[in-house]
Image (cartoon, coloured by chain):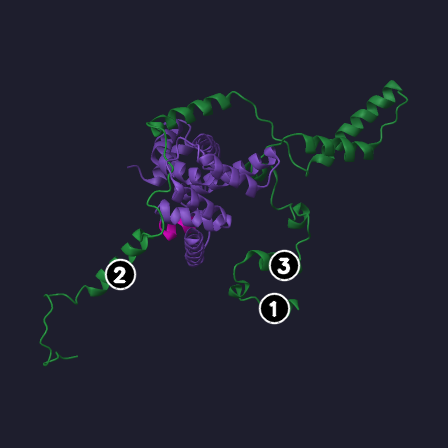
């Protein structure tokens, strides 16, 4: 596997950019997809946002200074793109973000790419009650199995604060799922 | 510390030597893989078969397609007065030369035409694109906020949005 520094160097050189970019996409597509999918929920929307994310990465790679790791920079772009996508859609539909999230959960019931039953739907409802950041932290930690240090780089939040967010999220989800 | 002569139990050889290391490994492993019994193992999301195989080609095709398009970037707010000024001077010049009778009001153009254009046109700029065209040095935070950023507003926001405001260790006496 190619070292990150070498890959970034190749991405910045016009003659090696295309090839390096293909490597970058193939290396990170799955992890980024699942990150995006858990925010926008619908597969087709996740596909659009994933493509936009990679296009932003391609266009902005010249400005990547290497202060953070490449994957955490891409995760940040993916997070921003996903949140922007939801805000634009709620604006277009003339509904609040909350209302849009409720509709997104309702759509899951008919989604062919969602094989959840009652408990999975209830989990999504529980997640929708959390502040955005707590939801992000919970999904990244529990379902994407990221380490706190990795999440810390992506969300630019201290590990201590992330642990608190995760703890609060788990408590709220547990309480919600145990409600009748 | 000597051996306890009355101790009849034995431990495997070398048991205590790496105890701390093994304990930390176990703690870290538990922290990373700890499953919560009240949660379903999967959250239910799945993807179409072979979806990931075609991602790279689709992204490359999108890039190729977008390379041929010119995407205009409309500087937001900061440049609207400059645009308004140029437009007004141009119209004024035309008006003077053609000797038309309809007077051109600079203020009307600036506040109505330009504002309407900015409001009705879907600028669709992401934070990254905005960051490219608006320099941070020349932007004051209060310029882009509807409500002035004052201590009172910040405290009010924190009170409504933070779980336990006291955890922030704020010195409330400063704000009383």
Magenta residue span: A147-153
Upstream in sequence: badge 2 or badge 3: 2
- Could you tell which of marks 1 and 3 lies nearer the N-terminus? 3
The secondary structure type at the circle numbered 2 is helix
For the residue carrying disc 2, how many other residues have a C-alpha within 10 Å: few (<14), some (14-19), or many (20+)?
A: few
Q: Which chain is purple?
A: A
Is residue A129 shown in magenta? no
Residue toward you, B110 or A5:
B110
Of residue B80 and residue B47, the one placed in the foreground of this image is: B47
In the depicted structure, whether residue B170 falls above or below residue B137: below
Q: CA distance from mark 1 to mark 2?
A: 40 Å
Q: Which residue is mark 3?
A: B156
State which chain disc 1 sits on. B
Q: Mark number for residue B172?
A: 1
The residue at 62%/60% (across/down) is B155
Q: How far, Cα to Cα, is label 1 from label 3?
A: 12 Å
The chain painted green is B
User: Quadrant location of residue A2?
Assistant: top left
Asked if residue B57 lies left or right of residue B150, the reply is left
Q: In the figure, B169 relative to B94: above or below?
A: below
> Foreground mark, 1 or 3?
3
Which chain's residue wears label 3? B
Q: Is residue A172 left or right of residue B115?
A: left
Q: What's the residue at 46%, 53% (across, down)?
A: A157
Residue A150 in the magenta stretch? The answer is: yes
Question: In the image, what residue occupies the spot 83% across and 24% down?
Answer: B93
Say what secondary structure mark 3 lies in.
helix
Question: Horizontal and vertical percent for residue A166?
Answer: 42, 54
Question: In the rendered image, which quarter contains the N terminus of chain A?
Answer: top left
Which residue reaches farthest top? B98
């Amino acid at each position: 596997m190619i070292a990150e520094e070498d890959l970034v160097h190749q991405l910045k050189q016009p003659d090696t950019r295309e090839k390096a970019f293909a490597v970058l996409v193939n290396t990170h597509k799955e992890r980024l997809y699942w990150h995006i999918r858990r925010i926008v929920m619908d597969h087709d929307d996740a596909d659009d946002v994933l493509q936009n994310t990679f296009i932003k990465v391609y266009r902005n790679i010249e400005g990547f200074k290497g202060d953070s790791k490449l994957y955490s920079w891409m995760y940040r772009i993916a997070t921003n793109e996903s949140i922007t996508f939801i805000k634009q859609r709620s604006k277009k539909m003339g509904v609040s973000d909350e209302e849009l999230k409720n509709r997104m959960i309702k759509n899951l019931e008919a989604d062919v790419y969602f094989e959840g039953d009652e408990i999975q739907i209830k989990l999504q409802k529980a997640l929708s009650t959390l502040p955005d950041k707590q939801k992000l932290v919970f999904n990244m930690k529990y379902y994407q199995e990221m380490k706190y240090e990795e999440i810390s780089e992506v969300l630019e939040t201290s590990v201590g604060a992330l642990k608190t967010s995760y703890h609060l999220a788990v408590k709220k989800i547990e309480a919600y799922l145990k409600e009748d | 510390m000597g051996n306890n002569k009355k101790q009849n139990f034995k431990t495997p050889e070398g048991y205590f030597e790496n105890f701390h290391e093994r304990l930390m490994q176990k703690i870290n492993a538990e922290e990373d893989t700890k499953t919560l019994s009240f949660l379903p193992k999967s959250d239910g999301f799945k993807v179409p078969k072979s979806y990931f195989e075609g991602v790279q080609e689709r992204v490359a095709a999108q890039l190729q397609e977008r390379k041929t398009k010119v995407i205009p970037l409309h500087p937001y707010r900061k440049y609207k007065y400059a645009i308004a000024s140029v437009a007004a001077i141009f119209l004024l010049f035309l008006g003077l030369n053609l000797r038309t009778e309809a007077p051109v009001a600079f203020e009307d153009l600036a506040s109505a035409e330009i504002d309407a254009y900015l409001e009705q046109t879907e600028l669709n700029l992401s934070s990254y694109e905005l960051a490219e065209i608006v320099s941070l040095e020349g932007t004051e935070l209060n310029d882009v906020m509807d409500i002035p950023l004052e201590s009172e507003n910040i405290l009010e926001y924190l009170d409504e949005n933070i779980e336990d405001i006291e955890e922030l260790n704020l010195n409330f006496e400063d704000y009383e």
